[in-house]
Image: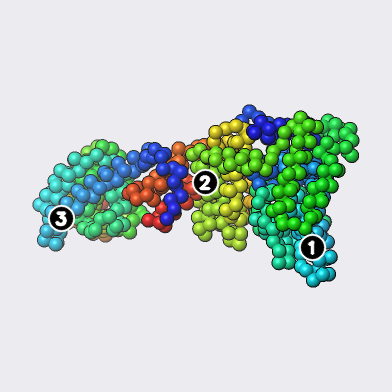
Amino acid sequence: MINPFEDFREYPYKKKEIPLDRIVRAKEKIMDEIVEGYLKLVEEEVKDLVWLVEHSRLVRAYSAAIRTVEKLDYDIDDIEELCLELDREGRIPYLISGPAGIYLSALCNNAGEENIRLRLHELKRTFHFLGYRLPQGKTLILQGDVGDFIGAGLSGGKLVVEGSTGNWAGAGMMDGEIHITGHTGRNMGEWMGGGEIHVEGYIGGIGKSIRGGRIYQQGNLIRPYDRTTR
Amino acid sequence: MRERVRSIYEFIQDNLYLNRPDMTVGDKSFNSALLFSLLTALNRGKELIIGEPGLGKTTSAEYIAAMTYRLPLGLIWASEVSGHPEQTEEKIIGRPDLGRLNQGEEMVVWSYLAQLPIKIVDEINRLPETKQSMILDGVDRGNWEYLNDVIINEEYCLFATANYQDRGTNTLIAPLIDRFDVLVESRHPGPDLALVIGMKDKYENILRNPEYEREFQKVLLERRDYHEKMQLIEDLCDRFGDYMERELDLKMLSRAERKEIRGCMQGLPLDLDANAFLRTVISELSFCYKYGQKRSDEHCEEGCHYTGFLCHRIKNCISNRFPTSVRTYSQSLAWLAGDEGVGIEHVKAVLPYAMAHRVQWKDDYVSQKQVSNRRDPLQIYVAKEAAKEVSKRYNEQSQHIKNALAVAYQALSGKDLKPIEGDHPVYAEIKRDIEEVT
């Protein structure tokens, strides 16, 4: 078979790299590490093939996630890219919603940026636990509908949901603000100890054990009932 | 020998075909019609000369032919074929020897056109399309057939002239037009040179010699073996050449010298830039992302990623004769310029003239260009613009293209390398070459 490029046999070739190649490669490396961290977490957390929402389990999973993400050098784009990867089911063989949300929350809480915006409206899946333990000084904006336990254990940060949430939004939150532009499900604010939740749409139900904090619907305070707190 | 060829060019330019220079190669200016005619004669090419009537289309070819092949002008006139609807095979190629036929013997009397190495077809587009096909084989291979006889020209070149389209002209058939290596225009020389031409005695021509012309004709009419006749003709050429040298103080070229020149030209290598540039041009003129290659009956759609390249503006696919034409004429030009190899400048100079008649542009693109300010006829102008455009693209990414070609060589030689990506059809074609083989 003739080699039609024979004239260029002696030409000193090199796999020339344009800046974009380097950027893409660096991004891919980071994403590989992020995905690897997620898979490790999932492996640890679903040994029993079932992932139950228990306080101790959440704490353990979150601590493990934080330990992993602290070693990574990533930015908001990488978090968003992970959301897309989790949604696509290509690179990531399995999605367990709980650990995935905890892991995404750990990434957001540990990120260098103070304001984080995740565009989730085009995703097929909804993620749970987003905004888990969002610390003071951080603002997380979630565009699109999200799942259960959004803003659970919120720790002083500001969480804005431009869409609707599932059940247990703001469960166990200690401080900070949650703004939901759409509707929210049942048990909202369960075990809430402080902070504020603002809902613009319909509320499916408010949690029974609320220890502190305030809940507003369309600007009106609906919890606590006590007149003196208004 | 190069100096002798240059002297021939200068002699014709100064004495016989007065015209303005219209192209530059390196630091030298040339008249394209004259330059390409000279190169055609030297490298056994085929040239189509277009232009208005009376502007020297045929004349330029005749002078070049006479001086590079040492043939008297009157003989060249006698060998010319005129294109007209009533033209016959018997006048173009040959006829039966009627005397012998009466005696029951079938012999062919070959036309001067078929026998002589110089072939001039005047107003070729006045030949009906069916008769254009008649000369295809002879034009292509120097292979002339009549009855059961055949002669093959060892050395020949073709000059054909064509007027612009009018009521009396036909379209040149695609297979015939593709066989022309280059297309040039014989232009108006401007009023001042036109007046100088007008002041000359049109009946007196230094390249004519009736005595020699009769001798040549006598040999051509003899009933001899064709190769024997050609040897006699060459002897006559030697004598006529000596005569011309005495008269004009100008030494012309013998058959052996022309052969030697061709050898020198063919030995000139294309440098890597010229090579890569030519590949870039061919890729733009043959590539189609959607259908694999350009085809005259398939139309590419709007919105294709490659709309910015020539492939989106043309209807047909460039033929394999195109790179041959560009290569041979670039080598000839480099030889004439005294360069040691063919560079990108030589290729760029030849490209529009090799492309002009072969590329069919889409109507909307032609309409855009038709009204532009220009000095060239539309075909050549559009080809020049296209060549400039590809050249600009090549300059922007020449290193990347050469690198892609080098990587392709290594990949096809077994190295584990991926083809280099880039935004040009040339990369897609390279990738295809690698992936379809490995």
Number of numbered labels in the structure image: 3
Q: Can see residue B345?
A: yes
For badge 3, the amino acid type reads Glu
- In the displayed orientation, state which residue is furthest to the bottom: B104
Q: Separation of disc 2 and disc 3 at Cα?
A: 54 Å
Chain letter, disc 2 residue:
B
Q: Is residue A185 left or right of residue A209?
A: right
Q: Nearer the viewer, residue B387 or B345?
A: B345
- Mark 3, residue position: A43
Left or right of A118: which side holds A132?
A: left
* Badge 3 vs badge 1, beta-carbon distance below 8 Å: no
Sequence-wise, which precedes: disc 1 or disc 2?
Answer: 1
Q: Residue at x 23, y 59 (%)?
A: A94
Q: Which residue is mark 1?
A: B95
Q: Residue at position x 65%, y 53% from top?
A: B179
The quadrant of the image that shows the N terminus of chain A is bottom left
Residue at 61% over, 59% down: B296
Subunit bearing disc 3: A
Residue A207 as seen in the image, left or right of residue B438: left
Provide the residue designation for mark 2: B279
